[in-house]
Image (spheres, rainbow, N blue to C red):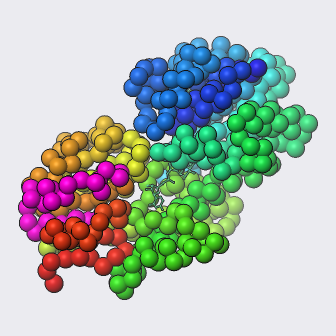
Amino acid sequence: MSNILCIGAGYVGGPTMAVIAKHCPQHMVRVIDMNTDRIAAWNSNQLPIYEPGLEEVVNLARGRNLFFLTDENIGEQINWADIIFVSVNTPTKSFGLGAGRAADLQFWEKTARQILEYATTPKIIIEKSTLPVRTAEAMSQILNTNSRGVQFDVVSNPEFLAEGSAIKDLEDPDRVLIGGHNTPSGKKAVETIVELYANWVPREKIITTNLWSSELSKLVANAFLAQRISSINAISALCEKTDADIEEVAYAIGTDSRIGPHFLRASVGFGGSCFKKDILNLVYICEQQGLPEVAEYWQQVLTINEYQEARFVANMVHTMFNSLSGKRIALFGAAFKANTSDTRESPALAVCRELLEEQADLSLCDPYALDNARVDLGDLSEKIRFILDPYQAAEGAHAIAILTEWSYFSELDYQRIYDSMAHPAFIFDGRNILDHQKLFEIGFNIYPIGKTPLQHFA
Ligand code: NAD
Ligand code: UGA
């Protein structure tokens, strides 16, 4: 039996520890956070994040071998634990050297110093947060300054879950990656973490590597995923010029088993808390290592993403007779993807901000993400109506923009919506989730991504 502590009860720490606690009833799991509201929510019936299946897992383990606590007695918690997962946020640095690109490691370093201050018995420290390659070296250096002779083994175990499918991804991961030092105690630490995951993950899916490969693989995995989206989005622009259809192209190339069908959905752009920050971090590391050509290569993934968002808004402006001023527009979707309440780096909010610049009159509609959107938009939120009901949001609108791929947006009664809108009525489908032909027949003018528009006027 082990005592497992996780520092950071966010989108990763909370679900990951809940799944570990579910599958390892022999271990005790405590998750702590300095955000007391977040901990209160984890202990309530209204969990702090929306994630399909999360409530069931939490309800099963919470109070049995899963406990959410504030960091009030962090020293006691650190001493209680044998294994400490560090799952704190690692945002992009907003100040000083590397501002806007490097990872801000202040939260991470603070936890290292807290562990150093309080630990009196040996610990395995697990990097769960996404970190620049060679961070474990800094962590080891900080920890090994302890004068008490306490043994610390730092292990990298990056998380690959995607929001909206976090529980499924944790229950049945493609792989679990564990990196450690090639020393006797390093190998033992890796084996302990392998044993932990082997409680429910088949051994052949548990990959062990050296520390640096593990840290770097996490950044590279996100960079490759984002690169695929930027690649298909770049081609979507070409499709719109040539009457090719992006879905047909994606299908045609995706059936090549070497390319594969995933992550080829053209969209208004990718969002989420990690793709942008991790690529910025990768670019920064390459520059620091004297590899400007490599840095520039990955930077293009972000450039195309910004281009795609800007292109979407420009298309709305040009299509609606070069003026959006005072025009009512219903934005369907605020979350950065479906099945999450998360709005961090959401393309929906980027579009929202740009449309406000055009003085459009906006209604924002989302089933779970309106509270987060309000916070993220700050003062701008006063200029927007937040409406849960899509029918109400679309009433009197000149246009609808689909910004999140919530499936229920494709199941609405669009005849009813059309009848309640101003005419001509426009739909800009930033996710290609609607039945375009059917909507065109109702009377809408349709502007998908990477496809020929369907419009009732020349
Ligand atoms: P998050 O912001 O949701 O959660 C981090 C939590 O850590 C916050 O609640 C914060 O209050 C807490 N915290 C920070 N410093 C602390 C301290 N010293 N003591 C106690 N609590 C502290 O972030 P997240 O989305 O869970 O991401 C965490 C890490 O995991 C990041 O490095 C991210 O890149 C990585 N990651 C995220 C995802 C994802 O889907 N969100 C997926 C894979 C990896
Ligand atoms: C992503 C990765 O998929 C996870 O493996 C990783 O652990 C995580 O980042 C992280 O490190 O935070 P996430 O951002 O939660 O997960 O969600 P994704 O499904 O990857 O979607 C990211 C964005 O890309 C969303 O805005 C989504 O709508 C968009 N997307 C995705 C597309 O536009 N097209 C696609 O084909 C796929």
Residue 66 placed where, x, y %? Answer: 59, 21
Residue at 78% across / 34% down in the picture? 195
Query: Could you tell me which quadrant the C terminus lies in?
Result: bottom left
Q: Is 191 in the magenta?
A: no
Give ligand 1's quarter of the image.
top right
Q: 105 above or below 122?
A: below
Left or right of 119 in this view: 442: left
Q: Is residue 96 visible in this depiction of the protein?
A: no
> For this rendering, which residue is in front, 247 or 72?
247
> For this rendering, which residue is in front, 394 or 318?
394
Most distant residue in the right direction: 184
Asked where in the image residue 358 lies, by quadrant, the reply is: bottom left
Residue at 9% across / 59% down in the picture? 419
Asked where in the image residue 403 lies, by quadrant, the reply is: bottom left
> For this rendering, which residue is in front, 324 or 378?
324
Left or right of 292 in this view: 320: left
Residue 237 placed where, x, y %? Answer: 39, 77
Residue at 37% across / 86% down in the picture? 242
Q: 351 above or below 423?
A: above
Q: Is residue 244 visible in this depiction of the protein?
A: yes
Most distant residue in the bottom direction: 242
Query: Could you tell me which quadrant the N terminus lies in?
Result: top right
Q: 415 above or below 207?
A: below
Residue at 10% across / 69% down in the picture? 424
Residue 411 placed where, x, y %? Answer: 28, 54
Q: Is 422 in the magenta?
A: yes
Q: How many marks?
A: 0
Residue 298 placed where, x, y %? Answer: 57, 66
Q: 15 above or below 318?
A: above
In this picture, which residue range is highlighted in magenta? Answer: 406-429
Left or right of 370 in this view: 260: right
